[in-house]
Image (cartoon, helix red, strand yellow):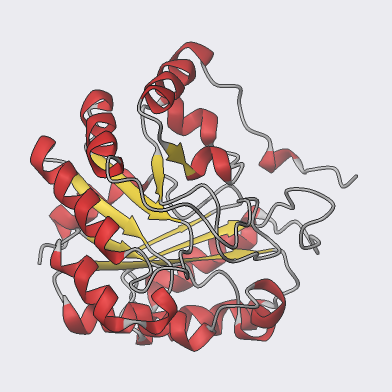
Amino acid sequence: MTVKPEWLRVKAPQMERVGKVKDILRDLHLNTVCEEASCPNIGECFQAGTATFLIMGPGCTRACPYCDIDFNKKPPELDPAEPHQLALAVQRLQLNHVVITSVNRDDLEDGGAMQFLRCIGAVRALSPKTTIEVLIPDMCGNWAALEVILRAEPEVLNHNTETVPRLYRKVRPQGSYLRSLEVISKTHQLAPNVYTKSGIMVGLGESDAEVRQTMRDLREAHCDILTIGQYLQPSPQHLQLVEFVTPERFASWKEFGELIGFLQVVSSPLTRSSYHAEQVRELMSKNPR
């Protein structure tokens, strides 16, 4: 087994706070990507009273070899109570900023866009001061579905690019690098007031030059916020880890990203797409639209 370097070790959380968040989630029959995807920051985020809600799951219609979310070719019908239950959780946790993400639902004609719309509306009704970030799939390139989500006016729309073009077929066999870029560019075109965000993971064999070119591609697509984090292999059956990337390289990418015009770059070994997502509130105050 590969030994994790010191910089990837996380502090044990205060279990009382973590347990309280989990109790609320179980009581309302909700899923979080924090748990389903085995995020290493679950303790820190739950301790702080934050969570990234996973709707329309937990089973995903795609089987990406890096991801720890279960594959389900025929997931169940959407839960009509889910938007209200999610809104109740946001209210009980008193969140200032909430992230709503989903599994891929390629079985649905709109990819689940209407459920995103309902969830955003429900949160707005109970917690009108809470800022909302949605982390969406590529919707199979259905731009009418993207318009439905943007109609709800989330403050941030996030879609993860995940990796560099050369590795796409291996990492995201059912995805498309160009389509992921287009999600970002279409969002900017359709809703220029919405902050756009994307994320990539490293440690899969990509070169420094490839990471930097991907960053340039995202900026050209009008991506405002970027996250870069270390890929961690969930199990021996998942995509093989190639290397542990040093904190110094993450720092260099952050510096480069700021130089080419990203409003914010969060780049560190433990960074995930929703890690410290609440910091966007400060970014919005400094860069109003």
The extreme top residue here reads 16
Indicate the quadrant where residue 41 lies: top right
Looking at the picture, does residue 65 appear above or below residue 140? above
Tell me if residue 194 can be seen: no
Q: Position of residue 83 (x, y in %)?
A: 25, 44
Up-down relation of residue 197 to residue 9 (above or below): below
Residue visible at 53% across and 34% down in the picture? 42
Looking at the picture, tell me which residue is in the foreground, 242 or 157. Answer: 157
**In the image: residue 98, left or right of residue 32:** left
Whole-percent x, y for residue 271 in the image? 53, 50
> Would you say 165 lies left or right of 89 here?
right
Residue farthest to the right?
A: 1
The answer to whether residue 6 of the structure is visible from this angle is yes
The part of the image, by quadrant, that contains residue 20 is: top left
Q: Is residue 271 above or below residue 50?
A: below
Q: Is residue 267 above or below residue 189?
A: above
Task: Judge left or right: residue 260 versus residue 283.
Answer: right
Q: Quadrant of residue 11?
A: top right
Residue at the spot x=64%, y=80% of the render? 168
Q: Measured from the top left, where is residue 258 in percent x and y?
A: 38, 69
**Closer to the camera, 242 or 174?**
174
Q: Residue at x 40, y 74 (%)?
A: 139
Q: Quadrant of the N terminus?
A: top right
Closer to the camera in the image, 119 or 18: 119
